[in-house]
Every structure is written in structure tokens, then in C-alpha cells.
Image (spheres, helix red, strand yellow):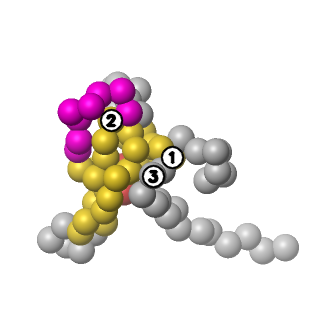
Amino acid sequence: MRLKAVEKQFSAGDLVTIKNSRKEEHFCIIGFKYNEEHQPIAILKALYNETCIIEKPITELKTLLIRGKL
């Protein structure tokens, strides 16, 4: 049996945290855009803070979902 590496894919609505963050804040992905180098950037809304909306590269995100499903 051969195993194949699968690239992580995030979708709008996924629940995530930020890798290497001091705070254990949870975010929901509300959209995506691309930076000048054409790398995908996720637009995140904090789950427990109505006014916190940030942008992070998808490489800095860690999913809160087990095997991609709730």
C-alpha cells in the first residue's frame, strides 16, 4: 500500500486556530484572498469576539476539526 501526501485544504466556515500563537483563540474562516506573491490568505473572525477580524496565511492555520469533519 502506498500513502500519498494530501495538501491541506481549508474552506469558508472551517474552525481553526493559529499555529505558534500564545493565545488559544478560535476562529472561523470567512473568506480568502491572495497576497502579492499569489499565496492564499485566510480572513478570520474570532468566535468569541465580535469585533476581531484578522488575516493570516493558510500555512499558519491549524484545523479544529477532526479529519475535516465535525
Give the structural element (helix, strand or loop) at label 2.
strand
Looking at the image, which residue sits at the far left?
36
Q: Nearer the viewer, residue 36 or 26?
A: 26
Asked whether residue 19 is drawn in magenta, I would say no
Q: Is residue 26 above or below residue 4?
A: above
| Residue 13: mark in rendering | 3
Q: Pointer 1: residues within 10 angstroms few (<14), some, or many (20+)? A: some
Tell which circle, 1 or 3, labels the residue nearer the N-terminal end: 3
* Amino acid on which disc 1 is placed: Thr
In this rendering, position of residue 28 left or right of residue 7: left
Q: Quadrant of residue 31?
A: bottom left
Disc 2 to disc 3, C-alpha distance: 12 Å
Residue 49 in percent (x, y) is at: 29, 28
Magenta: main secondary structure: loop
Q: Which residue is mark 2?
A: 46
Residue under the image location 53 percent in, 67 percent down: 7
Q: Quadrant of residue 34?
A: bottom left
* Amino acid on which disc 3 is placed: Gly
Question: What is the magenta range?
Answer: 47-54
In this rendering, position of residue 48 left or right of residue 68: left
Residue 35 in percent (x, y) is at: 19, 67
Tell which circle, 2 or 1, labels the residue nearer the N-terminal end: 2
